[in-house]
Image (spheres, helix red, strand yellow):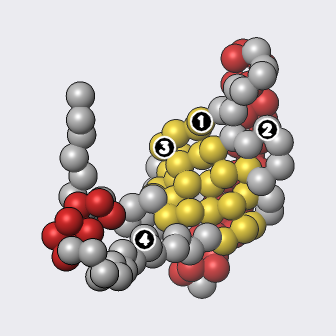
Amino acid sequence: MRTTSAQPSINQLTRSFGPGWIVHIPERWGIMTDEINGFAIEPSCRNRHLFRRVSEPKHEYVFEITPKRIVLHATLPDAVGRDRADALDDAERAEKDAQKAAEEFQRRIFGWAPGPSEREC
């Protein structure tokens, strides 16, 4: 089964423009990442960010970060070469470090971090 994408391939462009043309296909914009407390942070969508642990095991966490709250939406354990139960336990232990990194990221973006009484549950 052949799939098509929205971006034409080099062969399609060469056939369209003929031989001798140099086709420039712009690369996808680089994703801006930050690194805080051992986590690489990548924007996922508007308020959601992917926190990927830099050191092994490379667990991933998806946080929604707004000026008033931080919500953990997903924990994605790295179970490569490990028992699934051990990977889940380790990811749960590292979740506190990811939460601290998310709080620091919130402080850097919005200039402050609300205290526990100011956060929405």
SS type, badge 4: loop
Left or right: 76, with 27 as reference point: right
Q: Residue at label 1?
A: 76
Dot 3 or dot 4, earlier in sequence: 4
Amino acid bearing label 1? Leu
> In the image, which is nearer the foreground, mark 2 or mark 4?
4
Q: CA distance from mark 3 to mark 4?
A: 27 Å
| Image quarter of residue 19 | bottom left
Residue 73 numbered mark, or none? 3
| Image quarter of residue 115 | bottom right
Circles 2 and 3: CB atoms closer than 8 Å: no
Residue 28 numbered mark, or none? 4
Left or right: 5, with 10 as reference point: left
Q: Is residue 100 above or below residue 73?
A: below
Left or right: 22, with 102 as reference point: left
> In the image, which is nearer the foreground, mark 2 or mark 3?
2
Q: CA distance from mark 3 to mark 1?
A: 10 Å
The image shows residue 105 at horizontal and vertical percentages of 64, 70
Visible in this render: residue 100?
A: no
Amino acid bearing label 2? Pro
> In the image, which is nearer the foreground, mark 3 or mark 1?
1
Visible in this render: residue 93?
A: yes
Left or right: 87, with 32 as reference point: right
SS type, badge 2: loop
Q: Residue at label 2?
A: 57
Circles 2 and 4: CB atoms closer than 8 Å: no
Bin the neighbour count of mark 2 within 10 Å (Cα to Cα): few under 14, some 14-19, many 20 and up.
Answer: some
> In the image, which is nearer the foreground, mark 4 or mark 1?
4
